[in-house]
Image: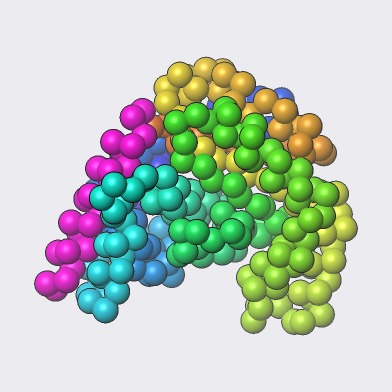
Amino acid sequence: MGKLFHHEALRPQPTDYCGRIWKSDDRESLARAIADLALGQCAHVERLLKSTGSWQSIPATYSIDSAIKSLTVPQGMDPWHRDGWVFQLISWIAAIEESDGLTRFPQMDQASKGFDGFQLEFDPGTGKVARAVISEDKATDSPRDTVREMVWPEFVSIERGDRHPRIAVEIGALLNGRYSLESVTEAVDRLLRTPEGLAYRASVTAGQYHTQARDFNGLFNDFESSVPGSRARRRGNVLEVDNLRDWMDALCFRAVEILKADRHV
């Protein structure tokens, strides 16, 4: 099928974090992916993202109405919850395309308080888990304020150890059935005790004002103050979108059309 996003590294790269811009030219395939993810067909989407197969209709009539509801903003309600959740799905797609690691399926509850995304990366030499990557994904019209006021405090809290039990559960869930119990326990202990065992991935929406600048116009300033250590621990991503709400409305409208067509398959 090919990738849904162009993953453009900043040129030159910032000195204190790894920066990428996500751009999508294939709105139809992206809408199809969002529709399938809204149905809960995460394994199906992941398999297609890692293959050259083509999208197929999924006649999952039992859940189509629920999926349509999740992509629709109720009349008179604010779109932030819907758009934030859809951006988490987009960030999950980008994570699958960028890494060969193990990536937790996206959250299906728009009000969930868990990590927005969670991924394990492996050492190609030893085959051991090298790092756990924790994602914060924010669809916003005010990216710099959101990063400073919401993302950095969350990362500081994790660095302090406040979320280590949750991280241990996430690591165990991804490795369960792949590693022995002893190996899972060793991986959890090592990642939480090693300064480089955790990495942080901040992803936001922003317009060309930020994406055309050398350093995202300071969008991720102070990343190193929140997450010390090597540059590899800090990843900053931007989905280039002008007129965010209109863009999300159009994407979700098309995904809903696809779901309604699936009802008749």
Residue 88, can we see it?
yes
When the figure is inspected, residue 12 is found, relative to residue 134, above or below; the finding is: above
Q: Which one is in front, 179 or 164?
A: 164
Q: How many marks?
A: 0
Give the residue displayed 29% in from the left and 47% down from the top. 76
Q: Is residue 247 inside the magenta stretch?
A: yes
When the figure is inspected, residue 142 is found, relative to residue 39, above or below; the finding is: above
Q: Could you say which quadrant of the image residue 125 lies in?
A: bottom right
Q: Which one is in front, 230 or 204?
A: 204
Give the residue displayed 77% in from the left and 82% down from the top. 181
Magenta region: 242-265
Examine the residues drawn in magenta and state their main secondary structure.
helix
- Which quadrant: the N terminus? bottom left
Q: Which one is in front, 244 or 53?
A: 244
| Residue reaching furthest to the left | 264
Q: Which one is in front, 146 or 224?
A: 146
Q: Could you say which quadrant of the image residue 186 lies in?
A: bottom right
Q: Is residue 148 inside the magenta stretch?
A: no
| Residue reaching furthest to the right | 193
